[in-house]
Amino acid sequence: MGLPRMANIAPFLKRYGVFIALALLIIFNLIVTPNFISMRTVSINLSQVCMIVIVGVGMTLVIATGGIDLSVGSLMAIAGALSPMFFTGQLFPLPHLYLGIAAGILFPVLAAGLFGLFNGFLITRFAIQPIIATLILFIAGRGIAQVSTNGDLQVFKVPEFQAIAIGQVLGLPFQVWIMLALVLIAAFVLNKTVFGRQVLAVGGNEAAARLAGVPVTRVKLLVYMISGLCSGIAGLIFIAMNSAADANLIGMGLELDAIAAVAVGGTLLSGGRATIIGTLMGALIIQLVKATLLANGVPDAAALVVKAGLIILAVWLQRQEQA
Amino acid sequence: MRFRFQPSHGVIIVLVVLTLLGAWRYDGFLGVYNVQTVLRYNSMFALVALGMCFVIMTGGIDLSVGSVAALASVVSAHLSPYGLWPGVLGGLAAGLAAGLLNSIVITKLKILPFIATLATMLAASGTALLLADNQSVSVSYDTAFTTLGQGDLLSFMRPEWVDAEGAGFFAQILGFILSFPTPAWIALAAYIVGAIALNQTAFGRHVLAVGGGTEASRLMGLPVDRTIFAVYIISGLTAGMAGVILAAQFGAGQPIEGVGWELFAIASVVVGGTLLTGGQGSIGGTLAGALLLGIIYTILNFENGMGWISLSAYWQSVVRGIFLLIVVVLQSRLTRDRAREA
């Protein structure tokens, strides 16, 4: 009697583990943390995970193919450093403010996407391991951002642009809606489209996928480009939130946060199994644990140690399921 | 045996050429002051890269080295009032603890090195901030601790005739070597031990065998887990030592230093001709790789001083990235050609 029931619980936990963990965290906070449910708290916590989730969406796809992208933080810096040059009229005088803003959104995101494509090119053309191929832009990318701004802080006050991060729609910051839209699109693409199947096939067994006629090279190029595009968007949100672009700071260390969110969310780090919603949940769990600890008087530094334990626990649980 | 060009030879040649070029082009490039500055600062990175080299040769990776160095710098700064040795041992103990944590999580819990060391990175960083109370910790100047970073180990044995008027070429070279800073001697000693361990001991063979093929090594009865265990301990210890030097050199334990050191170390190892897939590596190449990446900054500075071009310090990361790109692409070509030959 006992055994079959246990066997039924395991897949249930596997499927809904992150949801349960998140629910428990929320219930705990409702009881313990004062003012937890206020719109302000919700709004702040959501804003803080936005960039991590947006970068995490691209990272999930990359990791699903068995790769990794260390360059995301630096690509954020490139996009963030380029953008103000367009909408403040530094590069060329603006015929119209909204035209400048449109250019300031479009070109930096495209640039980040192209750099992502470059990552994919190195990985597919030269068979360089993803961790090293993306290390190149991790190092050089921030340099490119710093060189293009001469390392200077660019302060701006353009509310029309900053609306992409802090403008409110239905009580939530606009960036939250961007995040939700990207999560939904990516989840749909991963689960319901041929491309999504191909991504998982490449991560599951690249040689087999190739033999089965999956365009492995194209799939890999695309996921790294998508990761670049996501980083670009996150970079714009970063500068819009701060109303300043500092190439030295934008996206610093974000690659690790994004990887942590993907790992905690239940995506297999060796590729072949991925969940976008899981990444969202993973980022929320990490953020909520941090917020819970802070609200209850635990110092920020100790929260880092807890986060480390959380990552190991999540990955270890993953291994137990596989075994 | 026919001489075969190894990737590590390339980096040594480039390093020598760049050094000669610098010496020819810039005044004072090989002057005592400049050499001391370059060696003093880059010894920390060289140490971290040495540990990383061992880890990478087994096919692993250690992302925690930067924050472990930061943690070690905080611990040794706290212990520096008790003297030189308590400071050093404290820093090494911090490195050992982090290395142990990595080893256990990787070999016992069977978690990918990438993730295990990422977690240790966060944990070490958090612990460093907690121990330092979120600020840098001053080092005691009453003890000999700071000589570790700021002193020149062999300056006491410098004979007077070295600096005499009209000293010969040999005397000048000797004087030059005797002026090396203490951190450089520490790093050099570590590299010599590392090179012997890799090339002359059974442990070194095991490291390369495990990196070449973990399953095959296991079937051959090699102590795979013990070897993997050892390399992360080595990496922890070298990062710990780098942290001690960091504290001694700048007079403070710095909990937020070390950001990006791991990637710099990986870059040094790769530029030095060690294969990232493991199984093949060069200790000398790693040292050359670390020095090469360090020297780029100096050359940029001198070149700016010449007035021909004006490149900001930010260009150094771009140049480093381009270097890494060239090396990695060449490496991929080279290994593919080898595979075809075989």
Image (cartoon, helix red, strand yellow):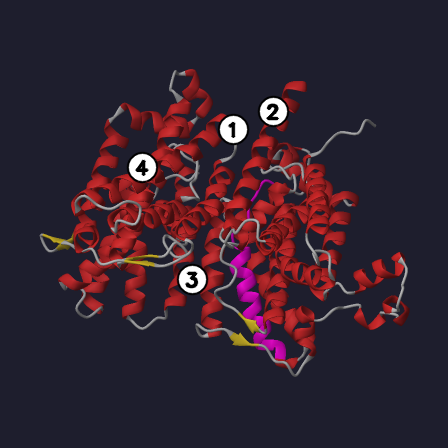
- The picture places residue A316, in percent across and down from the top left corner, at 43, 47
Tags 3 and 1 touching, CB below 8 Å: no
Q: Marks 4 and 3, Cα distance to the nearest angstrom?
A: 37 Å
In the image, residue B330 above or below residue A210: below
The crowd level at tag 1 (other Cα within 10 Å; few <14, some 14-19, many 20+) is some
Q: Chain of mark 2?
A: B
Q: Evaluate whether residue A284 shows in this view.
A: no
Location of mark 2 (residue): B336
Q: Name the N-terminal-most of marks 4 and 1.
A: 4
- The picture places residue B240, in percent across and down from the top left corner, at 61, 62
In the image, residue A270 above or below residue A17: above
Q: Chain of mark 1?
A: A
The amino acid marked with disc number 4 is: Leu
The crowd level at tag 2 (other Cα within 10 Å; few <14, some 14-19, many 20+) is some
Which range of residues does the magenta coloring cover? Answer: B58-80
Location of mark 1 (residue): A127
Q: Marks 4 and 1, Cα distance to the nearest angstrom?
A: 25 Å
Q: Are marks 4 and 3 on the same chain?
A: yes
Callout 3 secondary element: helix
- The picture places residue A147, in percent across and down from the top left corner, at 44, 50
In the image, residue A225 above or below residue A180: above
Q: Out of A210 and A264, give the one closest to the viewer.
A: A210
Q: Residue furthest left?
A: A170
Q: Marks 3 and 1, Cα distance to the nearest angstrom?
A: 36 Å
The amino acid marked with disc number 1 is: Ala
Q: Chain of mark 3?
A: A
